[in-house]
Image: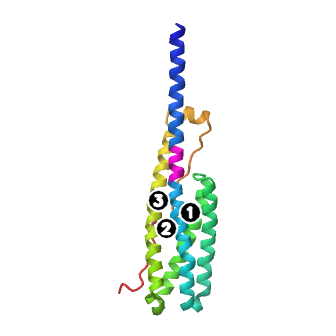
Amino acid sequence: MSWVILALVVGLVLWAVGIYNGLVMARNAYKNAFAQIDVQLTRRYDLIPNLVEVARKYMAHEAGTLEAVVQARNAAVNGLGQAKGNPGDPEAMRQLAGAENQLTGALGRLFALSEAYPDLKANQTMMQLSEELTSTENKVAFARQSYNDAVMNYNNKREMFPSSVVANMFAFQSASLLEIEAEHMRQAVRVDFGAS
């Protein structure tokens, strides 16, 4: 009889360890997916000062727009820094999404104004930077989707019975999606400097 009880206890412990390890793997998966967002957003942030500098030469009367882009970029860098410290944290994800929303809006205004400057539109450096920025925007969108999928998988594991019992015992917290609030954030920034 004691062997049966011992076998049940060992089986229960192995079951709990398996669930715990599955939760850890799912949590690590969404953190890794966020690291991919970090890489792409950092690349985006690195391109923006060069873009602003090229535009500054041509858009002397648009200093306010250029400054808005720089300020939005700095806010987004800060938002990413906070989110990197705790991927999945609802407040960090909300702040990052808001900062990205502002940055995308500022970039949209910059590109709209640049249409009035034919020399800027024809500038090779500007065209190359805008192409790289568009490519990076697409990569950000894919990385964000991967992150959100990993978060959903983790949250499902964490909330479904019987793993919810283990998750609650070891304080596995819910992770938050990186949600897009504004419609224009759902699309990559459209850049067209000379396609016509």
The residue carrying mark 2 is 185
Q: Is 9 in the magenta? A: no
Which of marks 2 and 1 precedes in the sequence?
A: 1
Neighbor class of circle 1 (other Cα within 10 Å; few <14, some 14-19, many 20+) is many
Q: Distance between the Cα atoms at labels 2 and 3?
A: 14 Å
Give the secondary structure at mark 1: helix
Name the spot of residue 156 as percent of width and height, x first. 48, 42
Query: In this view of the protein, which residue sits in the foreground, 87 or 53?
Result: 53
- In the displayed structure, 97 sits above or below 109; it is above
In terms of image quadrants, where is residue 95?
bottom right
Left or right of 28, for residue 145: left
- The amino acid sitting under disc 1 is Ala
* Image depth: mark 2 or mark 3 in front: 3
Left or right of 130, for residue 42: right
- The amino acid sitting under disc 2 is Met
Which of marks 3 and 2 precedes in the sequence?
A: 3
The residue carrying mark 3 is 143
Name the spot of residue 176 as percent of width and height, x first. 55, 51
* Image depth: mark 3 or mark 1 in front: 3
Q: Distance between the Cα atoms at labels 1 and 2?
A: 9 Å
The residue carrying mark 1 is 97
Neighbor class of circle 2 (other Cα within 10 Å; few <14, some 14-19, many 20+) is many
Q: Distance between the Cα atoms at labels 3 and 1?
A: 14 Å
Name the spot of residue 134 as percent of width and height, x first. 44, 73
Q: Residue drawn at (64%, 65%), measured in percent from left and top? A: 78
**3 and 1 marks in contact (CB < 8 Å):** no
- In the displayed structure, 87 sits above or below 12; it is below
Identify the mark at residue 184; answer none if there is no mark.
none
Give the secondary structure at mark 2: helix
